[in-house]
Image: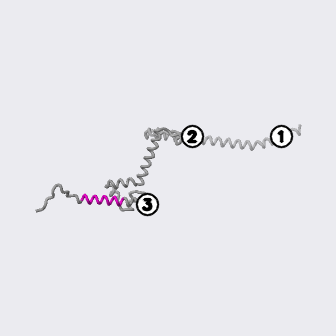
Amino acid sequence: MTEMPTPSEDRYAHLRAYAARQKQTTLDRLEQAIAQLEREGRPVTTFTIREASGLDYMAYYRNPEALALFRRHSTHLRMAREKAQAKRRRSWRQRSGPDPVTQEVTISSRDPLFNYKKPRLVAELRAAQAQRDQMEQHYSQLLQEQMQSGLTIARLEAQLPRDAQRDCIAEQQMRETG
């Protein structure tokens, strides 16, 4: 007769062992790829890991240890973490009060325009554009008037010596006749 496995025997032990070896192989290949990329000074991204090791993202996405390793070394995720930490540090400084050395002017952390709905923002923008256009027209008119005034002044200044010369001639003629 055939032997029936006892319930205590694990029929899938060989599959679990194979899966554990695959997980470790994936982790090792990922570690080698990350080390190579960091030695070369290249960014650690899913694309560069595929180039260096041939591992697809899904291969280490399904492996929790490999995914954690990737996330620790990912260039993009590292920059995002650094931005978030810098933001937290800035917000901590703001809560602790302004530092006179680093911050001379207190800047509102929230712009009041963020409270407006889009239709109101559009209306405000159009009103500001209309006001700007009106101011540009007024400025253009003032500029034209200023240019006309400048031309008139130049014309009068050019005419002044001629008038003075004519007055001198007229005075001399009156002296001679009189």
In the image, 101 versus 169, the foreground residue is: 101
Comes first in the chain, label 2 or label 3: 3
Comes first in the chain, label 1 or label 2: 2
The residue depicted at 42 percent of the width and 52 percent of the height is 78
The residue depicted at 42 percent of the width and 53 percent of the height is 76
Q: Which residue is identified by label 2?
A: 135
Q: Is residue 81 magenta?
A: no
Q: Is residue 25 magenta?
A: yes
Q: Which percent across, then down, holds residue 68?
A: 35, 53
Q: Which residue is identified by label 3?
A: 39
- For badge 1, the amino acid type reads Ala
Image depth: mark 2 or mark 3 in front: 3
Number of numbered callouts drawn: 3
Q: In which quarter of the image is residue 144?
A: top right
Q: Which residue is identified by label 1?
A: 170
Comes first in the chain, label 1 or label 3: 3
Left or right? Give the position of 35 relative to 173: left
- For badge 3, the amino acid type reads Arg
Q: Which percent across, then down, holds residue 126?
A: 49, 41
Dominant SS of magenta comes to helix
Location of the C terminus by quadrant is top right
The residue range painted magenta reads: 15-30
Q: Which percent across, then down, holds residue 52?
A: 39, 62
Asked whether the viewer can see residue 146, the reply is yes
State the SS at label 3: helix
State the SS at label 2: helix
The residue depicted at 68 percent of the width and 42 percent of the height is 150
- For badge 2, the amino acid type reads Met
